[in-house]
């Protein structure tokens, strides 16, 4: 597994030695002596995080962070700023420039490591989160599935998406489509959290595709709750005329005019007790097959892989 990389920017060689000693066991460490050199190293070495001093020659910490945040390819990088006891007031400028956190020197190594871990975890989640629903994205979903496989305890995975969503989007526009995705996310959150308990997980792969993980014994209740509430909510997203007649006029992939019923939700449920799951790709493949079968029924429903291998 790749070690995350931290760039330390400080003109004091003693501080650099302390940082290297503190960080090198858990992280790959690269170093720069001032802000100008730090910007160059950031572009060359692609660090996951930066720790910089406030008082530096050539370019101080606040100037360094401002320059970093102006670069659209670098502005996501988290920065911890170090300062001496007498410079605490100056830290306001560092925070305003865009620093994520700061520590006063001399610092406790354990506190620095704890803050690094917290900020890196928060950054990964923020970058991975779906911008529309703020639910964990594809990377987090894959990591969560792998953790469940590694633990070796039984679990079930639900793959949910909306039927006839593209045609709805074409007819009503993307803004209305985004409203439906957010509404679907709220329904999923409610039923996965309420019925799945604290060990349940919910992610948003993208578009109208969602993934949720819970104990296999709880999946029937979760899926039934999602379907029932979705079917009650879906008509609200249509105008009165379309809602009364129960369909809209759309076009298929060949451009032919067709009647399309109201939105529905299909869920494919993969149960780890009925398949010998060894890697994440297996779950995705089985889930896609089950969801395809569920979508063929032309109404909200869910399908489980009941047959044992």
Image (spheres, rainbow, N blue to C red):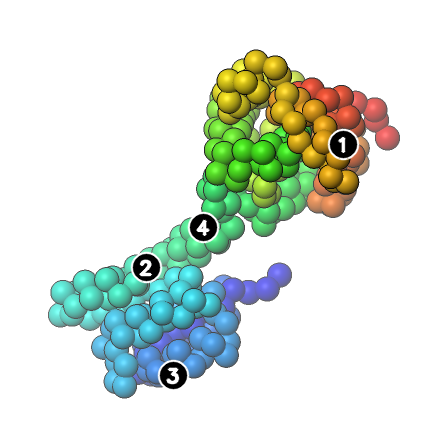
Q: Nearer the viewer, mark 2 or mark 1?
A: 1
Q: Give the mark nearer the N terminus: 4 vs 1.
A: 4
Q: Is residue 108 or residue 238 the one in the foreground?
A: 238
Disc 3 marks which residue?
A: 37
Q: Nearer the viewer, mark 1 or mark 3?
A: 1
Q: Is residue 83 or residue 192 the one in the foreground?
A: 192
**Quick check: 29 left or right of 293?**
left
Above or below residue 171? Residue 238 is: above
* Tags 2 and 1 touching, CB below 8 Å: no
Q: Secondary structure at mark 3?
A: helix
Q: Give the mark nearer the N terminus: 4 vs 2.
A: 2
Q: Is residue 1 or residue 265 the one in the foreground?
A: 265
Disc 2 marks which residue?
A: 100
The image quadrant that residue 82 belongs to is bottom left
Disc 1 marks which residue?
A: 292
Above or below residue 119? Residue 230 is: above
Which residue appears farthest toward the bottom when viewing the image? 58
Res 270 seen here? no
* Tags 4 and 2 touching, CB below 8 Å: no
What is the distance, in whole Å, between disc 4 and disc 1 at their CAs?
31 Å
Disc 4 marks which residue?
A: 126
Q: Give the mark nearer the N terminus: 3 vs 4.
A: 3
Q: Is residue 87 or residue 288 the one in the foreground?
A: 288
């Amino acid at each position: 597994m790749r070690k995350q990389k931290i760039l330390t920017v400080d003109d004091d060689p003693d501080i650099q030695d302390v940082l290297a000693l503190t960080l090198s066991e858990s992280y790959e460490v690269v170093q720069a002596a001032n802000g100008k050199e730090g910007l160059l190293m950031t572009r060359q070495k692609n660090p996951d995080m930066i720790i910089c001093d406030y008082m530096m020659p050539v370019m101080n910490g606040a100037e360094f962070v401002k320059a970093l945040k102006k670069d659209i390819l670098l502005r996501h990088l988290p920065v911890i700023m170090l300062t001496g006891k007498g410079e605490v007031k100056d830290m306001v400028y560092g925070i305003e420039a865009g620093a994520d956190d700061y520590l006063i020197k001399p610092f406790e190594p354990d506190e620095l490591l704890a803050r690094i871990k917290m900020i890196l975890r928060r950054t990964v989640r923020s970058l991975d989160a779906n911008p529309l629903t703020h639910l964990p994205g594809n990377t987090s979903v894959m990591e969560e599935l792998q953790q469940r496989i590694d633990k070796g305890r039984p679990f079930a995975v639900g793959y949910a998406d909306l039927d006839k969503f593209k045609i709805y989007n074409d007819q009503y526009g993307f803004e209305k489509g985004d409203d439906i995705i957010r509404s679907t996310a709220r329904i999923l959150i409610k039923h996965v959290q309420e019925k799945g308990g604290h060990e349940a997980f919910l992610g948003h792969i993208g578009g109208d595709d969602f993934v949720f993980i819970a104990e296999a014994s709880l999946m029937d209740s979760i899926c039934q709750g999602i379907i029932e509430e979705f079917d009650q909510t879906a008509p609200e997203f249509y105008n009165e005329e379309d809602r009364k007649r129960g369909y809209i006029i759309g076009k298929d992939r060949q451009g032919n005019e067709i009647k399309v019923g109201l939105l529905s939700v299909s869920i494919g449920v993969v149960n780890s007790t009925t398949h010998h799951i060894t890697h994440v790709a297996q779950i995705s493949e089985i889930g896609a097959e089950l969801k395809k079968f569920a979508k063929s029924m032309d109404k909200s429903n869910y399908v489980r892989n009941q047959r044992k291998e």
